[in-house]
Amino acid sequence: MSDPLLNVEGLTTVYRVGGREFAALNDVSLTCQAGERLGVVGESGSGKSVLALSLLNIIRAPGRITAGRVVFADQDILHLRRRELRRVRGGGMSLIFQDAAASLTPVYPVGVQLGEIIRTHLSVTRAEAARQSVQLLGQVGIPEPERRLRAFPSELSGGMKQRVAIAMALASEPSLLIADDPTSAVDVTIQAQILELLRHLVDERQLALIYISHDFRVVSTICERLLILYAGGIVEQGDAPSVFNAPRHPYTDALLACSPSVEEYRFPFATLPGNPPNPRDDPIVGCQFHPRCPRALDVCARETPHEESPTAGHSYRCWSPLDAPGRGSSAAASAP
Amino acid sequence: MIAQRLIAFIPIIIAVSILIFLALRVVPGDPVTVLTAGSPVPAEVKEQLRREFDLDKPLTVQFWNWAKNAVQGDFGISLKTREPVTELLGETLPITLTILIGGLILSMLISVPLGVIAALRQGRLSDQLIIGATLVTLSVPVFTAGILAIIVFSFWLGWLPPFGRGEGFGWDRVSHLLMPWCVLGLAMTAAQTNTLRAGMIDVLNREYILAAEARGLSPIAVIRHGFRTAMVPVVNILGVQFGYMIVGTVLVDFVFGMGGIGQLLVDAVNQRDYPVVQAILVCIAVAFTATTLLVDIVASRLDPRYAD
């Protein structure tokens, strides 16, 4: 296999919270091939957004990347000069933010913002940039794109804003699109549309996609490979069907049990007891998940599990994995 | 929206004019005493003066007559010099506006870069130096700064003329205006710099700034994305500062002997020259209301959300 488009090794991002350091991202390694669609699943606080920002090396104080390597298209992102880094941001890797409304500058019309991105990354004339902007707005399904160019973000609906944000991410013609839970801030009906749009655009342009979400089902419909993030670390990864149908890590299993689906609608919803580690508490020794884990052994509280990969294309970090075939017990999820 | 606001102006100006008119009648002192310079005159002469200046008529009629003429740009004649008030305004208003606008431009030229730099360097030495320097300019009263400037630049260095308004449109004029501009401009810099700094710090923490960076925009482009929003409170401050600036120009006028509206107002008040005081106050009221409107227009141009 050729060099992957994105290769991340041991990426660690640390935040200073209340006088002590807290690893929001802990020794994360992943690869993404050109055109591959990677899903990252985790509950809130698992480090999903930090991962997205770390890939672009755009972590702000009080956070900083303390270890690891991010290699994108043979460029060492963490040691690039500012000018080259700017070329990668947007130009190579594009990020769609979770809250589109908050990621659009309120004081400039949509067309100005799109045009600015196009002219920053592609050397085209103002007129050509305007033409491309109209085209992009049309491609993301915005009616009357010429007219919308003059609209301010505040004049658009939530779904429209997310579409504009997607157009902005595509404007610079990236080869990797990172979507940070782009459907979490919009209505369910819009969610499906946005998801379909993304799938279509990624297919059409043969982009690599890293889709980050808290929603297992959303991710598994669009991605070929899944990564499960817990407390800043990857606990399980593998081909989507394999992880989805035969999870090995108890956390993955619990997450699956918690995702409601139309077919097996149950009320009340299953929940996962406990909370992810709190940055203000003492760091957890051993497996980060063990305090909440129904299958925890003594060793889990002492040592961090190694990465096990019994089958090709599926690996996990657990001392007490579920059995390989079929779904394990859903004991981790309780329905009060 | 602008047309609506302009219509809303009319009752405000009328109300303010009535207030000013009444206030001046309530203040002790008889205009006739001013007209006769306090010397004893026969009762018939006094009566004649009263008739000449409408003072024998009821207040309502006096106000109506005054307002009717004022709308046409005729503010009556000065009790002291017997010159038309409109002419007096014509002589003094341009120089005052020149000082005011020049000072404003100068203060913006100083405070915009300083405010942005301070915000970008938040907590560092350059930020603290900028805050410290603006606090110094804030703490020095305008007349003290003016006198200091005259001592240094006129008497010690001999670079600039200490008094007068200069002539023409060349260096002579500028050399006379330079110190008034600086003194007035510096007095306004502190509030503007600190407001812009606070606004920029707030804006730079917003997600759309992070997003702009993530889209690979240059640092200057990223700052521009936040600048307009950060300028809105500064423009609002300017509206408030306008009142302060009028006091400032009166003082600057006085210190540098510019012969502007400030000097005219001080003299007119001292001499109970009602028509002059009244005309100047109404002018200030109109300017004040116009400024608030202008502030709103500029702010909504800067940030489309402002109108909501």
Image (cartoon, helix red, strand yellow):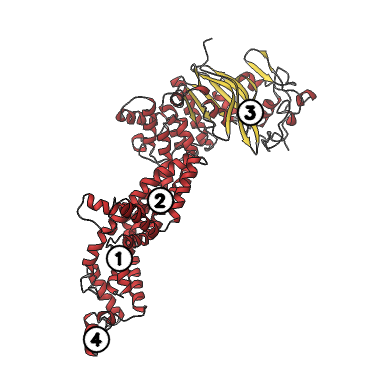
Q: Quadrant of the C terminus of chain A?
A: top right
Q: Chain of mark 4?
A: B
Q: CA distance from mark 1 to mark 3?
A: 70 Å
Q: Residues within 10 Å of mark 4 (few under 14, many from 20)?
A: some
Rendered location of residue A210, percent (x, y) = 53, 24
Which of labels 3 and 4 is toward the front? 4
Q: Chain of mark 1?
A: B
Q: CA distance from mark 2 to mark 1?
A: 24 Å
Q: Earlier in the sequence, mark 1 or mark 4?
A: 4
Q: CA distance from mark 3 to mark 4?
A: 94 Å
The amino acid pointed to by label 4 is: Lys
Residue B46's tag is 4
Instruction: Tell me, yes or no, if residue A158 can be seen here.
Output: no
The amino acid pointed to by label 1 is: Gln
| Circle 3: element type | loop
Circle 2 residue: B189
| Circle 1: element type | helix
